[in-house]
C-alpha cells in the first residue's frame, strides 16, 4: 500500500463550508465551493493566490467543474440547478451563460458530484437548508442523478436522504455512493460504455 501524507495547503481560506474539491492539472489550481457562503473558490498552487466569486441571486453553490477545452467556462451546481458559467478566476462575480437543467423536486439542493472518465456528471441531492431541519432522517426526498448534454438529467436512485461520496474502482466496473442518513456505502455494477448502474449492494 502506498504511503499518504496529509498537509495543510493554505491555513486560512475564509470560508464557511468548503467541499467538492477539483484539481486542474493544466493550471495547477484547486477549485472548490463554499456551499453556505455562496462562493466559488480557486487556489493557484503556483502563487498561493486565493480567488473567490459569487453568482448573482444564487444562495448555495454546491460544486464547480471546469469544461475541457473551453477556457474560463465551468459547470456549477447552484441550489437545484446545473448552470454553465464564465469566470476568469479573478473577478468577484461569475457570469451565468445558461441553465442546463433544474431538479424537478421542490425543497432540495444539489450536494456531492463527480465526473467519470467519459465526462458524464454524477451528483446527488439533499433537503435544502431553507426547509428547516435538513437532518430529518424521515424525509428522504433526495435522489442520485447522471447528467450529459446528449441525454440530459437521468435519475439513477430515489429516496435518498443526504447524498455524499461518489467513487469508482480502478477498472471502472464498480461505482460507490454514500447516503449519510443511512451511514451506508452503496456499491453498484458500473457500465463504462453507457454510464448505467445496476445490482445495488449495501456494504455496511
Image: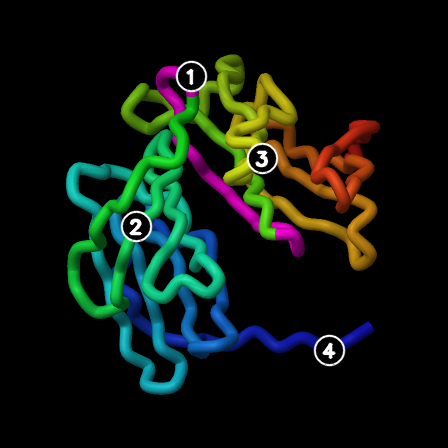
Whole-angstrom CA distance, mark 1 to mark 3, is 15 Å
* Vertical position of residue 78 compared to residue 69: above or below: above
Residue named by callout 3: 146
Q: Closer to us: mark 1 or mark 3?
A: 3
Pointer 1: residues within 10 angstroms few (<14), some, or many (20+)? few
Which mark identifies residue 3? 4
Q: How far separated are the C-alphas under marks 4 and 2?
A: 38 Å
Q: CA distance from mark 2 to mark 3?
A: 19 Å
Quarter of the image with the C terminus is top right
Query: Are dots 2 and 3 in contact, CB under 8 Å?
Result: no
Position of the N terminus, as image quadrant, is: bottom right
Q: Look at the picture and state if 203 lies above or below 22.
A: above
Mark 4 or mark 3: name the one nearer the start of the chain.
4
In percent of width and height, residue 88 lies at 25, 66
Q: Give yes or no for residue 114 being in the magenta stretch.
A: yes
- Identify the mark nearer the N-term, 1 or 3: 1
Q: Which residue is mark 1?
A: 105
Give the Cα distance between marks 1 and 2: 23 Å
The span shown in magenta is 104-118
Q: Secondary structure at mark 1?
A: loop
Q: Are marks 4 and 2 in contact (CB under 8 Å)?
A: no
Q: Nearer the viewer, residue 59 or 133?
A: 59
Amino acid at each position: 500500500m502506498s504511503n499518504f501524507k496529509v498537509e495543510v495547503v493554505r491555513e486560512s481560506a475564509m470560508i464557511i463550508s468548503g467541499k467538492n474539491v477539483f484539481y486542474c492539472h493544466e493550471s495547477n489550481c484547486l477549485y472548490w465551493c463554499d456551499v453556505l457562503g455562496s462562493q466559488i473558490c480557486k487556489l493557484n498552487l503556483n502563487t498561493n493566490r486565493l480567488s473567490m466569486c459569487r453568482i448573482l441571486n444564487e444562495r448555495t453553490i454546491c460544486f464547480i467543474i471546469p469544461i475541457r477545452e473551453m477556457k474560463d467556462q465551468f459547470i456549477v451546481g447552484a441550489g437545484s440547478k446545473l448552470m454553465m458559467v464564465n469566470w476568469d478566476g479573478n473577478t468577484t462575480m461569475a457570469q451565468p451563460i445558461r441553465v442546463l437543467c433544474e431538479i424537478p423536486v421542490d425543497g432540495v439542493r444539489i450536494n456531492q458530484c463527480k465526473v467519470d472518465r467519459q465526462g458524464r456528471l454524477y451528483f446527488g441531492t439533499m433537503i435544502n437548508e431553507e426547509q428547516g431541519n435538513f437532518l430529518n432522517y424521515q424525509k428522504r426526498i433526495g435522489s442520485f442523478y447522471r447528467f450529459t448534454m446528449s441525454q440530459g438529467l437521468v435519475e439513477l436512485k430515489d429516496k435518498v436522504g443526504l447524498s455524499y461520496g461518489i467513487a469508482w474502482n480502478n477498472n471502472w466496473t464498480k461505482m460507490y455512493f454514500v447516503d449519510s442518513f443511512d451511514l451506508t456505502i452503496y456499491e453498484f455494477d458500473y457500465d463504462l460504455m453507457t454510464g448505467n448502474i445496476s445490482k445495488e449492494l449495501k456494504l455496511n
